[in-house]
Image (cartoon, rainbow, N blue to C red):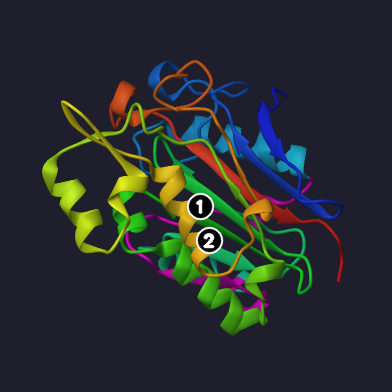
Amino acid sequence: MIHPELRYYDFGEGVTAFSSTRRGGYSKGNYGEFNINRYCGDKPETIAQNREALCELLKISDNRLLMPHQVHLTEVVAIDEAFLNLSAGEQQQQLEGVDALMTDVSNVCIGVSTADCIPVLLYDPEHQAVCAIHAGWRGTVQRIVEVAVDKMMKVYGSQPHKVMAQIGPGISLDSFEVGDEVYEAFEKAGFEMTAISRHNEKWHIDLPLCNRLQLEAVGVPRHQVSVVSDCTFKQPDIWFSARRLGISSGRIFTGILLKSIR
């Protein structure tokens, strides 16, 4: 069996965290090779093959590989044993319109799907809880990272100063050219525009920095936040980029899994 080529992140023993690259799967064309997103037009049979390959690599069953249907809002869903006992249809219903997942259940891989948007992973080593966040520009403006940290505090008792974070591959400041309406949305939301933007004929926004600053604002120490330097738009041979390939193309899956049995 072909295995996906993953970019792994180090959260320490007992945690597997990664972003999928384009390599090591069964999809073709703009979906090639590795894509497990069901909502971007790829063939169901190749998605199933790719999911099977990833689950084999992670040593989990398919029903423990979870990805929401994202809509660029700030809904965060906690995955618990009760959720896992629902039927597949009931689970899918609960994952509609969701942009972040979190869990403290072992051997469940939660993740989000991106192709220029910013994926963010959180790990609370004290309470053995993890979170995967989809932060496109709309979610970033609505401060989804702050919403997710707050929910981890309420559900698991997480303390932000003990949380570790990984910001995955997304579009860079150089490549994220936006219209005035996007610039104004960030400005209206209270972002420090001199820090996160640049004007070069058109406005550019630094989405990875926006999300790092949000993490710091809620108390996650800077030295506990790692940021991937890759730009999805500049490196389409490694990463999917919707701006470069169009929306009918594959997506990166950024996931996190608690391996230890509690």
Number of marks in picture: 2
Q: CA distance from mark 1 to mark 2?
A: 5 Å
Task: Please indicate whether residue 36 sits to the left or right of residue 139 in the image.
Answer: right
Q: Position of residue 190 (x, y in %)?
A: 28, 64
User: In the rendered image, which quarter is residue 160 located in?
Assistant: bottom right
Q: Position of residue 217 (x, y in %)?
A: 49, 66
Residue positioned 34% across, 34% down in the render: 41
**Which labelled disc corresponds to residue 66?**
none
Secondary element at tag 1: helix
Residue of label 2: 215
Q: Is residue 90 visible?
A: no
Q: Nearer the viewer, residue 208 or 223?
A: 223
Residue of label 1: 212
Residue farthest to the left, as pictured: 180
Span colored in magenta? 59-83
User: For the residue marked with disc 2, what is the amino acid?
Assistant: Leu
Q: Quadrant of the C terminus?
A: bottom right
Q: Position of residue 22 (x, y in %)?
A: 54, 24
Secondary element at tag 2: helix
- Asked if residue 228 is positioned above or below residue 144 in the image, the reply reads above
Q: Are marks 1 and 2 in contact (CB under 8 Å)?
A: yes
- Asked if residue 183 is positioned above or below residue 46 in the image, the reply reads below
User: For the residue marked with disc 1, what is the amino acid?
Assistant: Arg
Q: Nearer the viewer, residue 222 or 21?
A: 222
Would you call the spot at circle 1 few (<14 residues within 10 Å), some (14-19), or many (20 or more)? many
Residue positioned 57% across, 28% down in the render: 21
Q: Does the magenta portion include 255?
A: no
